[in-house]
Each structure stands twice: as structure tokens, then as C-alpha cells.
Amino acid sequence: MGRRREFDVDQALEAALCVFWRKGYEGASYTDLTQATGVERPALYSAFGNKESLFLKAFERYYEHQLDFFSAALTQPTSREVVAHILSGVTELNTRHPEHTGCLIINGALAGSDEAEPVRQTLIEARAKGEAQLRERFERAKQEGDLPVTANCATLAAYVMAVTHGLAVQAKAGFSREILEAVADQALSTWPTNN
């Protein structure tokens, strides 16, 4: 008969998420993770597997609980409203928690060792998936006449993702929410229309 788990798995996962969000995958040590979760290393291994598995579970939680604004944005009636919703959500997310600003995806994927390559690839794939969803939404907007026929939907999607990534980097560097909102407003001011 196995020992009963003596900690709340969801709380431990949330604490680990906060560590990864603040320090990135490689910057988060097992000492950081055990101190934040209040769970000893053997119990963490038992509950979550290795550090990579723990990160991937934390990332899944982040994706489900923190990036829900992205799916909601794709349902907005116009492409400009889609982008406004995304930029607003990104700005809010990146500045919501003063103790871990920025974006887990960007914080975790900018650099890494060869051993961290599987984690980096997971984060790259997540970004690519978001960009593809955005491109598809803009293609629909173009078909509906919301975007000019000359609009390059792949470039527009890449542009929006570049702005969101830049906002995350600026938030991590300590830029205020007001500055990030001004950057988002500037990006929206150049959005192509059919008028």
C-alpha cells in the first residue's frame, strides 16, 4: 500500500508555475521549486515526474487558466477587435502579477541548453499554433470583407504575435501597464481597414 500524498497537487502545481513564470525553465532550480511548493524533491518526482514533466504540466495549467483571452479574442466580430482583445489580454496578463511579470512562454523559450530543447520546442509550437489560429481568423476576416483584399494574413498574424512578444519582454523589463497599453494602442492605430 502506497503512502498517501500529503500535499495539495493543484497548489503545488500553481506554486511551480509561478517559479517557472518568474525564472523560466532553466532558471528554476529544484531548490526554487521545493521551497515554493513546500514539497520535498522525492515527493515532487513522485507526483509530477522530472523537472521537464513538471514544467509541461505547469505550462498546460498556464495555457488553460491564463491564456483563455486568446480563444475569446478569435470570436470577436472584426479583425481589429480580435487584435484589440489580444493586446488588452496580453497587457493585463503580463502586468497582473508583480512578482512574475512577462509571459511564461517568452520567459521560458528565449534561450536554453541542449537538455532544455524539448521544453523550448513545446513553447515554440504553442506560439506557432496561436499564430496559425490568428492567420486563419484573419483569412476569414478577409473573405468577409473586414480586411482589404491586399492584406497579407500571414504577415498580419506574425506582426500581432511580434507585438505580443515585445509586450511580454517589456513587461519583464519593468515597463508599466500604461506604457504597454500605449504600445498596444499604437499597434492598433495602423490596423488595415477597408475604408
Image (spheres, helix red, strand yellow):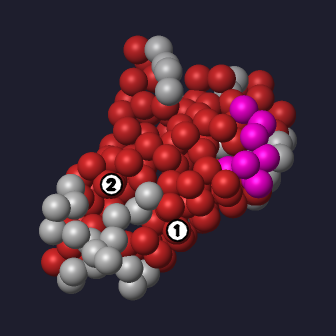
Residue under the image location 44 percent in, 33 percent down? 119
Q: Which mark is residue 59?
A: none
Which span is picked out in magenta?
173-180
Instruction: Give amino acid for label 2.
Output: Ala
133 or 37, which lies in front? Answer: 133
Q: Quadrant of the C terminus?
A: bottom left
Residue linked to disc 2: 157
98 or 149, which lies in front? Answer: 149
Q: Is residue 176 magenta?
A: yes
Residue linked to disc 1: 84
C-alpha distance separating marks 2 and 1 = 13 Å
Q: In which image quadrant can residue 44 be found?
A: top right
Residue under the image location 50 percent in, 21 percent down? 111
Quick check: 139 above or below 135?
below
Instruction: Give amino acid for label 1.
Output: Ala
- Residue 79 in percent (x, y) is at 37, 72
Question: Is residue 189 shown to the viewer in this render?
Answer: yes
Left of 49 or right of it: where is 192? left
- Residue 168 in percent (x, y) is at 61, 43
Circle 2 SS class: helix
Q: Residue furthest front?
A: 195
Q: Is residue 80 magenta?
A: no
Left of 81 or right of it: where is 23? right
Q: Are marks 2 and 1 in contact (CB under 8 Å)?
A: no
Question: Is residue 5 shown to the viewer in this render?
Answer: no
Quick check: 60 above or below 120?
below
- Residue 68 in percent (x, y) is at 53, 69
Mark 2 is surrounded, within 10 Å at the Cα level, by few (under 14), some (14 to 19) or many (20 or more) other residues, namely: many
Of the image marks 2 and 1, the number of the one nearer the N terminus: 1
Q: In which image quadrant can residue 20 be found?
A: top right
